[in-house]
Amino acid sequence: MVNSILNKSFSRARKITFPRDAKIIFFSDLHKGDNSYADDFRSNMQIYSHAMESYFENGFTYIELGDGIELWENKSFRPIYETYRPIFELLKRFYEKRRLYLIWGNHDMEFRDPIMVEKVMRAFFTPKNIADKDAIFDLKYDEALLLEFENSNRSIFAIHGHQADYMNYKHWKFNRFFVRYFWKYLQKWFGINDPTSPAKNFKGLVRVERKLNQWIVRNNQQMLICGHTHRPRFPDPGDIPLFNDGSCVHPNSIIGIEIEDFSISLVKWHYKEAEDPGESESSERSIIKTILEGPVSLDKFL
């Protein structure tokens, strides 16, 4: 069943061709919420904003691999938008430059419906004229992307990753109901992990990775980048080319995958540790990027 789901996602993936010198940043699993106790992203908002400003100024294309918005714990998009208005305005700048691609995951699966996307855009990004209207309302969320590069006959398959997680793909409404009305409160009061989330369920995480690995092997070592499990993954050349960009809800850090100069890297944005132990905690902390893995030429994986 999972293999069939992945095959369909691959066959329906939108193809995008990039030059070999393209600069791309992948983030996923932001789970932007309403700034309540259940909003896992709020503590990393400043880090994410700093990183995204840097990527925008340096000409990167932004690909969000799903679960950018937390619509399981929140019934309405409005409080999410009001909480993170500056971030949505930043994404709009990427969009206006044609450097924004959005993939839906299980927690924002409502956005697979283009009518839902247009409804949201009309409510929060009112066009000033007809030209602006045409530009704004062609925003779309994809299930999958197939990234091709000039002078290369191989591609990168980009998905959220819940396609290998049957319950979170086929029965996401059932899981959403339990998360929204039960697990979110059990986690708050008793610290009980959400069993529907592979990020909080190690057996589920391993199962998802195993199924993705099996699909890749069956499909001629097709390079794949995903999120969903929140566990960063960067294989060595010659291993199964399954990459995971981690998440943006790690403690005081966000992790993503960069492609630049036809090389791939796993990167972490975080607060710089104070060099002086006696430095005041109230002093402004700087945000830096650390390369965790790479860069490695894409030729090693494609």
Image (cartoon, helix red, strand yellow):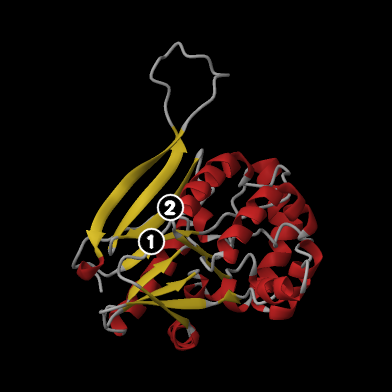
Q: CA distance from mark 2 to mark 1?
A: 9 Å
Q: Decide which of 183, 274 is in the foreground and name it.
A: 274
- Which amino acid type is shown beneath numbered disc 2? Asn
Please tell me which residue is depicted at 73% across the width and 44% down the height of the picture: 36
Tell whether 75 sits left or right of 286. right
Picture quadrant where residue 260 is located: bottom left
Upstream in sequence: badge 2 or badge 1: 1
- Which amino acid type is shown beneath numbered disc 1? Lys
- Label 1 Cα neighbours within 10 Å, binned few <14 / some 14-19 / many ≥20: many
Q: Decide which of 286, 233 is in the foreground and name it.
A: 286
Q: Position of residue 19 (x, y in %)?
A: 34, 72
> Which residue is the site of mark 2?
58
> Which residue is the site of mark 1?
23
Relative to 59, is 40 above or below?
above
Please tell me which residue is depicted at 57% across the width and 68% down the height of the picture: 105
Foreground label between 2 and 1: 2
Q: Position of residue 226 (x, y in %)?
A: 44, 66
